[in-house]
């Protein structure tokens, strides 16, 4: 890998929410800042900046990742999804988002995008997740408002609806 100048901006090419992107970033810019400030993906929230709270969780190449622990230049050639990509079309919520609305699974909403991204990925690979599995999985996210009860209820509801949709 070529050495990156600390002051120069470097072109990073990747896919963001299904669209090809080429944008310039300094070598030390965090992916959270790059997505929010340079690309307008303000659904990516910056919480602890240490990878602990989960507010910045996005999907990189099909896996959950903490954007605050990733440099923008590290995503060269990768495929990224942010919370902005969850809705199937403008004005319509995904099954998971709709379940969050139905169960009042957010209050301040700060942690919600990261939790939605993690659950979206998890439920795709674990459609039969039960409450214990979901609670353990969500242990990587901090929510100071809800007490997790409505979040788990929404995740269980979404899992059921996703199974029904798959079997239809």
Image (spheres, rainbow, N blue to C red):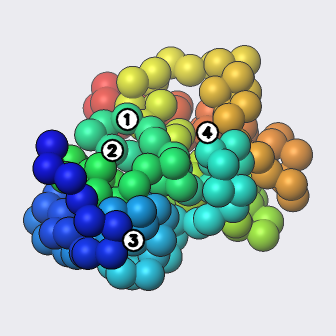
- Of marks 2 and 4, the one in the foreground: 2
Residue occupied by mark 4: 155
- The residue lying toward the viewer, choosing from 148 and 62, is 62
Q: Are marks 3 and 2 in contact (CB under 8 Å)?
A: no
Gap between marks 1 and 4, in whole Å? 18 Å
Gap between marks 3 and 1, in whole Å? 19 Å
Q: Quadrant of residue 25?
A: bottom left
Q: Quadrant of residue 132?
A: top right
* Neighbourhood count class around disc 3 (C-alpha, 10 Å): few under 14, some 14–19, many 20 upward: many
Q: Is residue 163 left or right of residue 110?
A: left
- Of marks 3 and 1, the one in the foreground: 3
- Vertical relation: 16 (above or below) 156: below
Q: Is residue 44 left or right of residue 91?
A: right
- The residue lying toward the viewer, choosing from 47 and 137, is 47
- Of marks 1 and 4, the one in the foreground: 1
Q: Earlier in the sequence, mark 2 or mark 4?
A: 2
Give the residue displayed 70% in from the left and 67% down from the top: 109
Q: Are marks 2 and 1 in contact (CB under 8 Å)?
A: yes
Residue occupied by mark 2: 60
- Vertical relation: 39 (above or below) 65: below
Residue occupied by mark 3: 34
Q: Are marks 1 and 4 in contact (CB under 8 Å)?
A: no
- Of marks 3 and 2, the one in the foreground: 3
- Vertical relation: 73 (above or below) 35: above
Residue occupied by mark 1: 63
Q: Is the C terminus in the top left, top right, bottom left or bottom right quadrant? A: top left
Give the residue displayed 88% in from the left and 46% down from the top: 147
């Amino acid at each position: 890998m070529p050495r990156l100048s600390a002051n120069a901006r470097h072109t990073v090419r990747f896919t963001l929410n299904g669209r090809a992107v080429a944008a310039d970033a300094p070598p030390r810019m965090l992916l959270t800042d790059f997505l929010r400030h340079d690309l307008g993906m303000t659904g990516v929230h910056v919480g602890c900046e240490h990878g602990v709270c989960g507010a910045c969780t996005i999907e990189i190449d099909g896996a959950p990742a903490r954007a605050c622990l990733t440099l923008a230049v590290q995503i060269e050639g990768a495929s990224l999804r942010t919370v902005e990509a969850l809705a199937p079309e403008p004005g319509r919520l995904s099954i998971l988002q709709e379940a969050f609305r139905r169960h009042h699974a957010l209050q301040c909403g700060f942690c919600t995008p990261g939790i939605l991204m993690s659950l979206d990925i998890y439920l795709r690979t674990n459609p039969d997740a039960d409450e214990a599995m979901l609670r353990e999985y969500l242990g990587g996210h901090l929510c100071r408002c809800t007490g997790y009860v409505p979040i788990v209820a929404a995740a269980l509801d979404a899992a059921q609806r996703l199974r029904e949709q798959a079997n239809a």
